[in-house]
Image: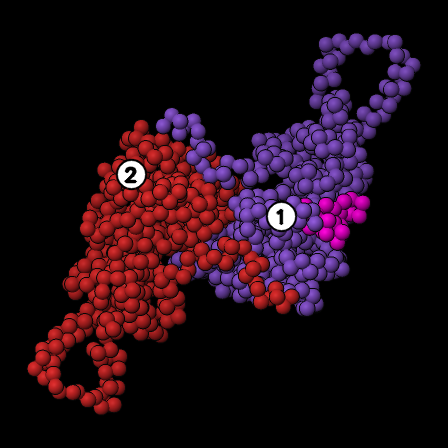
Chain colours: A purple, B red
Amino acid sequence: MEVALNNNHKFLSKIATNDGHGENSPYFDGWKAYDTNPYHPQTNPGGVIQMGLAENQLCFDLIQEWVKNNPQASICTPQGGFDFKEIAIYQDYHGLPEFREAIANFMSRVRGSRAKFDPSRIVMSGGATGAHETVAFCLANPGEGFLVPTPYYPGFDRDLRWRTGVQLIPVVCESSNNFKVTLEALEEAYDKAKESNIKIKGLLITNPSNPLGTFFDKETLKTLVSFINEKSIHLICDEIYAGTVTNDQEFISIAEILEEYPTICNHNLIHIVYSLSKDMGFPGFRVGIIYSYNDTVVNIARKMSSFGLVSTQTQHMIASMLSDNDFVEKFISESRIRLAHRHDLFAKELSQVGIGSLESNAGLFFWMDLRRFLKEPTFESEMTFWRTIINEIKLNVSPGQSFHCSEPGWFRVCFANMDDETVTVAVRRIESFVLESKMIEIKTKAKAKKHCFQKNLHLKLSSRRLEDTMSPHSPLNSPLVRAQN
Amino acid sequence: MEVALNNNHKFLSKIATNDGHGENSPYFDGWKAYDTNPYHPQTNPGGVIQMGLAENQLCFDLIQEWVKNNPQASICTPQGGFDFKEIAIYQDYHGLPEFREAIANFMSRVRGSRAKFDPSRIVMSGGATGAHETVAFCLANPGEGFLVPTPYYPGFDRDLRWRTGVQLIPVVCESSNNFKVTLEALEEAYDKAKESNIKIKGLLITNPSNPLGTFFDKETLKTLVSFINEKSIHLICDEIYAGTVTNDQEFISIAEILEEYPTICNHNLIHIVYSLSKDMGFPGFRVGIIYSYNDTVVNIARKMSSFGLVSTQTQHMIASMLSDNDFVEKFISESRIRLAHRHDLFAKELSQVGIGSLESNAGLFFWMDLRRFLKEPTFESEMTFWRTIINEIKLNVSPGQSFHCSEPGWFRVCFANMDDETVTVAVRRIESFVLESKMIEIKTKAKAKKHCFQKNLHLKLSSRRLEDTMSPHSPLNSPLVRAQN
């Protein structure tokens, strides 16, 4: 028994003990830093501001208004309560028919009604997290792989790999062409996997991209579809940010491509992952959707959905909300306006202090270019600088390496999970950081100049002066200075 | 492309194509028969009555009353709606603290407050289905096995095996000692697995048992715990029917054993699976719980819960409901009274028509002994007779072989998923079936006698008479007659 207690791990599975959950990634470390010292305007104004969370909190007033006006949508109101029993006991993994219809309707509307979705192909899962795992279980055996263009969402390493044993093979994309996915990069990754005896079963794209905040143009989508069709591998399109377009361009879903070019590929190879966590801002409700054009995958994924069904209480409410077309139209258009406003505000502020970012047109984040702040163009420097941002500037942003970015110095910063006041504080922190770094630059240059003239003069600091330099208000205590050390 | 379309399966995973979901079991066939012709008192009085569903629908009036009196528990009411945003965006896999506390509280109360549960050990999952899979992923590698006493819940074949690659090794229990689990049977199954080079990682019990409707006495539980401790394997206790006791005995949880005999085993080896689907009757809400005494399992299972979290809308409501101690006490005691009443009513009716069943004290079902109705004591005869019950008597009960029972002729019949009127219809059908079978018996005997005296007399049936014998009201059309053919 002694032995058993001391060797707990040996009694567990490899999956339980292999760290495959990926939570040792800096992406999650940042969350922990925020959790231990969260910013609050009154109670903790010096705390960490959470900019690592891709949440859409800009339209809850519209949702709350709808909920208030539709008491029949809830099984916990006098108006809807007579459905309580019927809803509480419903456990069919097909989902409530009205739920599937409402989701199909919403998916179409979010895509500008340029694509139709068949309710009988809507399969539920526990968020996009569960959806991705289910698709991976359906398409690939342990050891087989999916190509994934970089940078990509860190959670994929957990969702698609951990319990399935599937591998993710990066398709390297670079800043030189704005991280676009090229046929050459795809072929290179595919060939490399083949050389390593990894059977590639699919290509996984996020469209719009997390973390880039961009979406694919029609020509690129057609190229990708031709590529996977030629190789006879699957295409999994994560479109969970379909409703977060921030300018006047129109998002193009893979569903639209299939409707416009029906013979472009074997439809059995195409699968869409969707959710209401981003477009509606309901991550807590765990509404994940698999929409596959492959009958077998629909059938099997539905059986697997037993492991992560959506609560019928939530299905019932969502069914009612998303079948209200007036509300849906108003929500989609207003959400777009507000996201665009927030996007533009942030972009302007960043550019005013000289911080660049990838030009984007969707998503709840910027892909910020901080390469010039790194001491060296290495991932070690990126990590050092990132710790500075978290611990000193007190912003939880996410470093590019956690997204498998091939170039150090890029960071994802989320902008839709906070109120306007917090935005102001965050931007002010960035500004003062840049200002300080410029002052340091000037001082360092001046000091270097002075040093040339006075190289024989030794500076002796009194203990009092030493204290001054360590004060949090001293420019010498600037995070940038520490990062460069 | 032609090839791809015609060979869809070869592009999918082994898991997707190996039928490991287990839905080819008769257990699920019965559901399908019900689905295509469901009984309804007005619109389809000749339809199939669903007695294959272990649902607890007897106390929804209490729940509905509570919901009506507690509008603040819902985020969709004017009283609770100001929490909508906060709840909708909450996605921490620890779960709402008030939810975990309320669940721990409820788990204790259901167990007569004779065991305490630590809220920090409460891990969410997508129903007991997701909970079992998560525990299997944590404890065993593909190819390794769990011992499971028979008969056991058919869903385990899907939940614990399908995507994990884990094996379930039956521990054969028999009617001769009322299907009790003996040390001999455990040792035999363990040794047999060892001989087949299957590494046993745990023992899985359902307590109270589905389908037996019995629960373990203290001595047997202690024997099981000593067994697993000696072998250094895990004990997984599925206690999802803990709150369904139907007489004045007290259910004994494994948690109670550990509190009473703290040194009886290595606590790291003990894991409880719980849910609100049976005790509360909320299968649609997908509230599954893993309660492990092993810190590593708590930690890893929590990370895995990302694949099947409980909707925060549901967490919020449940937290409020189950932290109301007056309601909880009232619900538990009233539910017990009503289940006992239904149990006794059914037992009496069955015994009056001479149908026996295992003496039970919990659960939402009887383990019905229909061995004497089988033409032969084989599983083929059981299947033939079961088809008769479904197609002719129009009751969806579940055959023992789908529960891996070692003896043919046992059937599980559920009694808490219908209203009193439906119970009456179901019992009347059983009665008339037994009556018909007795008449057939008498007639057959009489006919055999007559045949002795008149063996040279050939009976010629007119077409008119033939029609009569095929009429659904003719005793010659009795399901039993067909089953015995």
Q: Where residue A41 sits in the image (x, y, percent)?
A: 63, 35
Q: Residue furthest front?
A: B195
What is the x, y in percent for residue A412? 69, 41
Q: Give the residue at x 31% y 68%.
A: B387
The spot of residue B39 in percent (x, y) is 34, 70
Kind of residue indicated by mark 2: Leu
Tell me the subunit letter for badge 1. Answer: A
| Residue A291, magenta (yes or no) | no
Residue placed at 85% from the left, 25% from the top?
A442
Query: Mark 2 or mark 1, which is nearer to you?
Result: 1
Disc 1 crowd, CA 10 A, few/some/many (<14, 14-19, 20+): some
Q: Quadrant of residue B182?
A: top left
Residue beneath the point at 23% across and 74% down? B481
- Taking the image as shown, residue B199 lies to the left or right of residue A334, namely left
Looking at the rendered image, the quarter that the N terminus of chain A falls into is top left
Work out which residue is located at the far right of the displayed protein and give it. A453
Q: Chain of mark 2?
A: B
Give the x, y percent position of residue B326: 33, 44
Q: Please name the residue that numbered disc 1 is placed on.
A: A198
Task: Give the residue pinned by disc 2.
Answer: B224
Q: Is B186 placed left or right of A248 in the picture?
A: left
- The answer to which of A272 and B205 lies nearer the viewer is B205
Q: Which residues are magenta?
A: A168-190
Quadrant into which the C terminus of chain A falls: top right
- In the structure shown, which secondary structural element does the residue marked by tag 1 occupy? loop
Viewer-closest of B284 and B215: B215
Which residue sits furthest left?
Answer: B453
Q: Are marks 2 and 1 in contact (CB under 8 Å)?
A: no
